[in-house]
Amino acid sequence: MTSSRVTGSENSSADFPSPERIPRRSPDDSGQQDAEQGRGGGKADSTGSGRATPPDSVDTGDVLAASVARVRRAAGLTLSAVAARAGVSPAYVSQMESGAANPTVRTLCQIADALGATPAELLGGTRPGSAAAVPHFPPRFAPAPLLARADGHHGIWDLTAPGASRVGARLLHADLGDHDHPTAHPGEEFVLVLAGSCRVAVGGVVRLLRPTDSCHFTATDEHHFTDASDDLLMLVVLTEE
């Protein structure tokens, strides 16, 4: 992609003076633009041999074009819908998706807002505060502990796969652990009663849970469990922050 691409017509008449534009390629230290050959964006060999070398990085314009098209389609929006939200023409949105447009920073922000994204996301980054990649770990298959259904036995079993860091799973048998008194912690919590019964209190709301009853809540809300029956069997799933 070269810098000779033209900017499409924008409907919005108000703009900043001398608008800053999203760069296609940066000039080198000598102030001269790298020569590009074909869509691949290769630079001319500095030795003067005329042979093209691979580009140093992915073209920002290509990333932007692909991101706008991908996010728009994922959101189920038409070109006209995005254009109306952003205050530009449908033709201009189409030019952005084809890589023919060279938007100003202001227009990029308008398009990102219309798509429910951030400019950084459209340029290949991630949303601020977004989680890192989920670590890979092998699946864990485990039979139900025999003592989990034994009369008179109380216990808590960890069902979490080794190496997992996002989710923890526990199986409780008539033992509420440290949740028998008000507590709070980061993340979310999901409980499912498989047998027996207990009461759960979350943020001042109290409910009796019986077999197949469940509760999903923000674990930063103060919560605890009481009145566990001797045959209580409950699955508890905890997430990280």
Image: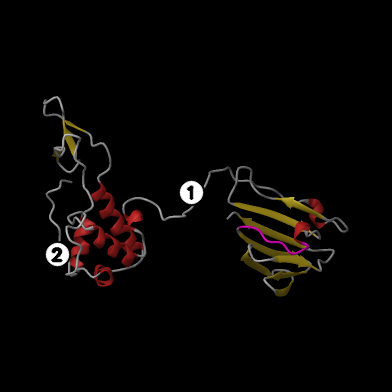
From the viewer's perspective, is residue 205 above or below residue 146?
Answer: below
Q: Which residue is mark 1?
A: 132
Residue 94 vs 167, above or below: the answer is below
Q: Secondary structure at mark 2?
A: loop
Element carrying mark 1: loop
Give the quarter of the figure containing the C terminus: bottom right
Image point (28%, 63%), residue name: 111
Start and end of the magenta stretch? 180-186
35 left or right of 187 in image: left
- 117 or 79: which is nearer to us? 117
Q: Position of residue 192 (x, y in %)?
A: 69, 64
Circle count? 2
Estimate the x, y position of residue 60 in percent, counting from the top left. 26, 48
Q: Residue 228 location in percent, x, y?
A: 81, 66
* Mark earlier in primary sequence (2, 1): 2
Measure the alpha-carbon separation of dots 2 and 1.
38 Å
Q: Amino acid at mark 1?
A: Ala
Mark drawn on residue 9: 2
